[in-house]
Image (spheres, rainbow, N blue to C red):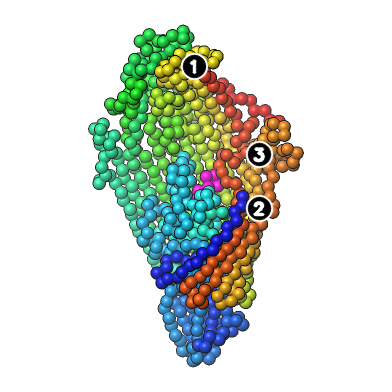
Amino acid sequence: MKSALLGLIVAVGLLTTLTAPLFAQAVTGTILGTITDSTGGVMPGATVTLKHEGTGLTRTVVTDAAGEFTAPALPTGKYTLAAELSGFKTMTLSNIDVGVDQRVRINVHLEIGAVSESVTITGSSPLVQISSSELGTTVSEEQIKTLPLNGRNFVNLTRTVPGVVRGIPGANIDGAGSLAWRASASFSANGQRPRDNNYLLDGVDNNETWLQTVVLFPSVDALDEFKLQTSTYSAEFGRSLGGVVNLQIKSGGNVRHGSVFEFLRNDAFDANNFFNNRAGRPKPDFSQHQFGGTSGGPIVKDKTFYFFDYQGYRVTQGQTFLSTVPSARMRAGDFSEINRIIYDPLTGQPFPGNVIPQSRWDPAAKNILNQIIPESNTGGARSTTGQTINNYLINPNMERQDNQFDVKVDHSISSNNRAFGRYSFQKTHRLQPATLPHGDAGVTFGAGDGNIKAQGLALNDTHTISSNLLNELRFGWTSIKFFMTPIDYKANLAQAVGIPGVNLNEVTSGFSQITFNNGGMRNMGSNGNQPLITNQNDFQVFDNVTLVKGRHTMKTGGIWTHRSREILNADLIVGQFRFNQNQTSSCAGVTTTCTPIANTGFDFASFLLGTADLEDRRLFDAGTYTETRPEIAAYFQDDMRLTDKLTVNAGVRWDLFVPWVEINDKQSNFDPSVGKFVVASPGAVINGVDVGRYLQTYSKRDFGPRFGFAYDLTGSGRTIVRGGYGIFWNFTPGGTSSSKAQNPPFLQATTFSTNFGSNLVLSKGLPDPPRRELP
């Protein structure tokens, strides 16, 4: 997909401004400027020395014939700038703050005098950037510390940025689904979809590609800076139509620093809820601890530094679940309390007294009633049918434990070569109860045992080849593993209660979904898409070359990404038996067209007879399948300072998004010309087109031009006009819906339904899976 964006804004720089536009350097920043004398004449040949105040790293550049200097690829942090030229006093400026992706312009005026004389100025970086057309915001370390963040989730920082709003509340990507429950990763930048955002951690891809969330959620105490670009960013950035979030883990320095923290919430000051008060129950448990610390400092002064952080999270939170279960009378087969007439599908007549004798009960339904369905434990309320509803109240605990840490080492190999390495680890375990002890068929998202383990590695080397030529090489690896199992996993409850054909192996060892179409009771059974396995492994290699030539800063580079994901994910893998009032209505047992008499039939009565209106299952092999694909990109960017007031940013990017391929060709796609699915093979053809193992075509001509400008209206750096245009390409994201391995014949689907018939019997279970026939 592509999107063409054209933006024009006027930025007024005030001394109270807190935000700064961004530039396209993935893990570093740039200091540039002009050296002039007291009359405004340019000073070629002046030596400019930049020293990192935390680590002692120095970089020396020389001004060109126009008095311009540019020092790209600088590690983030505070710098001291010293400018000197024979016959002039040395000018020193300290406290220059350089952030990720920032271009900081510092213009220096030299005064006549001896080089040994010096003038020292303590100041700060300009609040308005005049060298980039990009729109975005930098949130500094100090702001991150002081801003209140619910859950200490860095994604909430996006809501401080103009043009950004929260995504759809309650969506999977917002932290509400069965996969993405760790935290929300949802925001919309300038109206783009949340799934089109791009997350980077130390310049390395940090995107989870199943639901388009985040692999690693670093502790906010570990963040040096948070950057969000929302529009007209440079050609270096791709794979995104929305916002680009660039996070930088802190580095150590020559001075040792550390911190510890704990945030505690509990139920000491909480009030009880209405339902517990009405039932005379105590308030549910609640205890939440978020704790950890950081440490950073030198290993070898001025040369090697470390940074480490740890964060733990412990939650015990009582839930309040109110459900409808059969009343004591209904548990005996007596439906006289409701104003609906229960018909016998064998005789076509009402059951005497609206009571179903136990001799007619389905044996599996009887076992489920006695072993699985809990008895009511609170008074409830009467519905319009006379049924007692909301009569089962429980307060089970949700328990969660998180542990995560980051380790980062920075090393100056030489005065011209700097490298860093960072490893991150995050593991989360959650026990999520359901509204019923044996599950509620997905009413509670993610009910069961959830385990998520995420890891990341970044290795970066920045080599200053000469004062105007640099090379940046980076390697990245990210991994995230989801393993979700349902309540009663490995218990084989379907087999235990007498439903055959369900518990075929360990993968299908949960309890079947028993659902009620008319609200006779709460649905029960396993969540539909569990057990679930998604193991993502991504490897990346970047190389960027930066050349400064006069008023031009040119950058070119390439990115190679190898993505793989191992998957086990099938909805209704343990099957579903759905019960409807039709099977005990006046039309019960009728195989022809029939219109039921009003107020006849009841879904729980149909359940006792074991007569379902739908049996459904979607099954795969017990093992996983693995999809892989490469992504390749190359770009060129030229940032031109055409005049003292006008900077133009121009570039072009090429992206190649190759479709997913299953490593054993266990995928298929539909061929409309022949009306059947075609299985992957090197010679596969669909609709007369050679598609091979990809089973689809893809573009090799995804070129995206980028153009932008920044114009300083007054020359004072206070009022800037920016504009830009770009074409941005992205692959079609998605989970199961985009996986061709979920198509027949690899998906073994079984579905039977009836309107009023009695042929779908619970105790007969499910038939054997359909035989897989490969073309």
Q: Nearer the viewer, residue 170 or 576?
A: 170
Above-or-below relation of 580 to 256:
above
Q: Amino acid at mark 3?
A: Asn
**Residue 415 appears anywhere in the view:** no
Number of other residues with Cα within 10 Å of mark 1, as a class: few under 14, some 14 to 19, many 20 or more: few
Residue 270 colored in magenta in the image: no
Point 49% across, 32% down: residue:
528
Point 62% across, 73% down: residue:
552
Residue named by callout 1:
595
Residue 308 in picture, x, y percent from top left: 43, 59
Q: Nearer the viewer, residue 646 or 757?
A: 646
Residue 212 colored in magenta in the image: yes
Q: Amino acid at mark 1?
A: Thr
Q: Earlier in the sequence, mark 3 or mark 2?
A: 2
Q: Earlier in the sequence, mark 1 or mark 3?
A: 1
Q: Amino acid at mark 2?
A: Leu
Of labels 1 and 3, the one closer to you: 1
Residue named by callout 2:
656
Q: Would you identify the image quadrant in which residue 438 lies? A: top left
SS for callout 2: strand
Number of other residues with Cα within 10 Å of mark 2, as a class: few under 14, some 14 to 19, many 20 or more: many
Residue named by callout 3:
664
432 with respect to 592 (left or right): left
Quarter of the image containing the C terminus? top right
Residue 163 in picture, x, y percent from top left: 47, 57
User: Disc 1 to disc 3, how far (Cα)?
Assistant: 51 Å
Give the residues drawn in magenta, as a range. Answer: 208-214
SS for callout 3: loop
